[in-house]
Amino acid sequence: MASLRAQRSPWVVGITAEDDMALANHTAILPRRAADGRYDLVVLANRLPVDHATDDDGRPCWRRSPGGLVTALHPIMKRRAGAWIGWHGRSGPAPTPFVHDGIHLHPIALTDDDVAGYYEGQSNATIWPLYHDAVEPPSFDRSWQEHYRAVNRRFAEAAARVAAPGALVWVHDYHLQLVPGMLRDLRPDLRIGFFLHIPFPPVELFCQMPMREEIMRGLLGADLVGFQHAQGTRNFRMLAADLAGAKVTDGGIWYEGRDVVAETFPISIDVAEQQRLAADPAVRARAAEIRRELGDPRTVMLAVDRLDYTKGIECRLRAYGELLAQGRLDPAETVMVQVAVPTRQQIDQYQALRERVEREVSRINGDHAGIGRVCVHYLHQSFDRAELAALYLAADVMAVTPLRDGMNLVAKEYAATRADGTGALVLSEFAGAAAELGEAWLVNPHDVDALKDAFADAAAADAAEQRRRMEPMRAHLRRHDVNAWATGFLNQLDRAPSGCASSASRARHVARAGDGARPHPVQCACRVGGSSSAEARGARSRTSHLAAGTRPIG
């Protein structure tokens, strides 16, 4: 497997703060803006849709990120004169706003303390594990919470400055859950959407969060709140009533004089691009080459994950090792390729996970490998989209078995790549994709015996059985690709009333916002008493029953 081509990680490119400024000056051009000098569509995400890179001459440059979100929003943002607000990936001063590939980018500055507190701490050591069923215990730190508030405020103020009157603002993911409420105070004329890419937890888990009321008020600042799975939508509606005192009916959520819509919008992939890669002769040749490099085994099992404790890698390896030990899979005829993309390597839990995974890989190979033949090829590196597509084509069985996952697009990419209808997808019941890809071999990843049965059955399935399962999944993906997801969300947000202010107060605010000055908080006329502190105290008194477990776990 030495010839598998690793993609250079954008995090290892040596760009200094001075390089950042030179890079921004090199690529900055005068942005095309909305008619009034602002943007009609503003996207906020933790990261900008570009990565630090170097060009062929060794100079620092930007490279467009490969994610599906960027692919989906790129044509829409160009058409609507859109702007993207996000962190540029390095601590220190932010580059000046610039345009890359037709998208107007507005970098946000983070200090070293912000990165440690907002990103590594509150976002990824508190919220991430808590929202993933506390697979790893979350940590709580008041200084992290302060950094989270400060950075969310920074994002909200940036959006308030650049959004055109009545613009659509789409806020993404768990890093920025306070932004909708903050932005609502600053700019009530805006239509604000929020989409959570990870699971939204059940009531009992969410109520462990020290910032629980604050986060709920932040999310309820949006006009439209989207979730990957219907259970997350139900959890949010229950919490809106219990923690924020909102009136929740079958028709929606009534909060502080506004209608808030919470709906399910399962994200998808660029199916056309995945199919194009699968048909590329170079990719198909590479897939055949991979199988030869693996020794032309009867069965190739593939798993592609970020090296994260939510992905179920340890349970998967344990099940595979037991199958080999029991003779249900022949180690001379079966190979597993485990791609473990590096992530958050500075966080203790991730360092410990890597040690455990690599120890288990070594144990399996020590017990079952032969000279010139290993049972697990473990690749702790990133790959480009073409190489991943080749791996998908080479794999007979795709193992997507997270302990908890908002969606998991790898499962969808594998199905979309398999143009001939073959291939066996083993999919966790706790991945959001399971709600759409029900023809896969669905499995409880916490149950090692069930994992073993699913892997063995998938490996033994003939082509007819594979096609019977794969074709309905492929047809579903063609109807529900990432473009349909993005368009559906934005169309619904576009129909939302323009903020919660009355037409008169909204007109006064728009006139004030148009002068280019720094935005000032605006008190919406619909707020009773102008303060939510009494509401928060009342909401806390309503949560006493939650610890008793009176709500279902989602």
Image: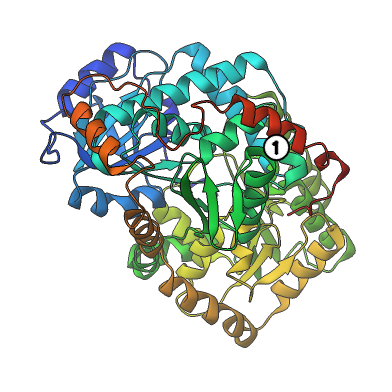
Q: Position of residue 284 (x, y in %)?
A: 41, 67
> Residue at position x 44%, y 13% from top?
111
Q: Position of residue 247 (x, y in %)?
A: 60, 49
Where is residue 479, by image quadrant?
bottom left
Query: Height in image: 55 above or below 239?
Result: above
> Residue at position x 41%, y 29% from top?
185
Q: From the viewer's perspective, tell me whether residue 405 is left or right of residue 228.
A: right
Q: Can you say which quadrant of the picture contains the C terminus? A: bottom right
Q: Position of residue 299 (x, y in %)?
A: 66, 68
Identify which residue, 209 or 99, lies in the foreground. 209
Q: From the viewer's perspective, tell me whether residue 293 is left or right of residue 45.
A: right
> Residue at position x 83%, y 65% from top?
450
Residue 511 appears in view: yes
- Colour theme: rainbow
Q: From the viewer's perspective, tell me whether residue 536 is left or right of residue 446.
A: left
Identify which residue, 186 or 206, lies in the foreground. 186
Query: Height in image: 117 above or below 130?
Result: above
Residue 83 appears in view: no
Q: Which residue is mark 1?
A: 130
Q: Disc 1 residue type?
A: Leu
Identify which residue, 238 or 10, lies in the foreground. 238
Q: From the viewer's perspective, tell me whether residue 379 is left or right of residue 449.
A: left
The total of numbered circles placed on residues is 1
Where is residue 116, by image quadrant?
top right
Q: Residue furthest bottom?
A: 464
Q: Position of residue 519 (x, y in %)?
A: 29, 22
Badge 1 element = helix
Label 1 neighbour load within 10 Å: few <14, some 14-19, many 20+: many
